[in-house]
Image (spheres, rainbow, N blue to C red):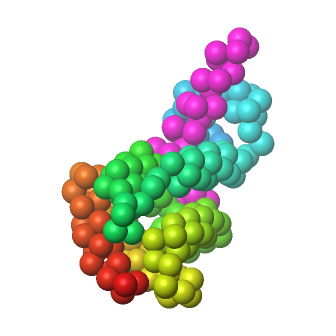
Amino acid sequence: MNTTSKQKTPAKIRAAFEKLLATTAINDITVTELCQAANINRATFYYHYNSVSDVYKEIEKNMEDDFKRFMELSTVTDNGSPEKSFYVTFFEFVARNANICRFLINSPCTSKTFLADALEAGHQKVLNDLAELYHDCSKTKIGYYYLFVSSGFLGLLSYWLNGGMKETPEEIAAIGESVSQSGIKYLA
């Protein structure tokens, strides 16, 4: 197996898994079904992964790494709210990973590790960024603001994903931005 093939096969398997996840519960996805969807044989699957669970863990890890890079690159404006590009980029990220994000939000059986880690990364970033902008505001107050806005964002995200993503990332980002900017007055 050449290097290009070694790199392409896991990508095919992950893409097939994500496609199956849109219509099949994660516990119901079998190696056989995944191999058929990826158009590979079982030996090829087992060359790259030990189980369907390993495929999911790799996808989740890749998403987590992408999200952390996204958070490191995002900045806030002078009024304390994230740049417009933050919201658009966030919802574009979700749109690119819609099936996995939908699964993470809706599945009662997942550990929600990614969501917990993502929210904590956001919490630390917002806490640090807003503390610099609002010197007289306590970190506790900023923390309350973040928890309120992030819970609303999860609700907005869930509603958008489960509603068929009818709005573009730009349109749904505008809603999130508007609500966040209205709430920022709490910190003043």
**In the rendered structure, does residue 21 fall within the stretch colored magenta?**
yes
Q: Nearer the viewer, residue 78 or 46?
A: 78
Q: Looking at the picture, how far across and down is residue 95, in whole percent?
A: 38, 50
Location of the N terminus by quadrant is: top right
Q: Residue at position x 44%, y 82% from top?
A: 145
- Magenta span: predominant SS is helix
Q: Can residue 107 be seen in the rendering of this structure?
A: no
Decide if residue 171 is on the left or right side of residue 117. Answer: left
**In the rendered structure, does residue 157 fall within the stretch colored magenta?**
no
Q: Above or below — where is 129 with respect to 62? A: below
Q: Residue at position x 51%, y 37% from top?
A: 15
Residue furthest to the top in view is 2
Q: Nearer the viewer, residue 49 or 82?
A: 82
Q: Looking at the picture, how far across and down is residue 92, in whole percent?
A: 37, 48
Location of the C terminus by quadrant is: bottom left
Q: Residue at position x 58%, y 31% from top?
A: 11
Decide if residue 106 is on the left or right side of residue 178. Answer: right
Q: Above or below — where is 148 with respect to 174? A: below
Residue furthest to the front in view is 135
Q: Above or below — where is 47 with respect to 18? A: above
Q: Can residue 46 be seen in the rendering of this structure?
A: yes
Q: Looking at the picture, how far across and down is residue 3, in whole percent?
A: 70, 15
Q: Looking at the picture, how far across and down is residue 55, in whole percent?
A: 66, 45
- Segment tinted magenta in the rendering: 1-28
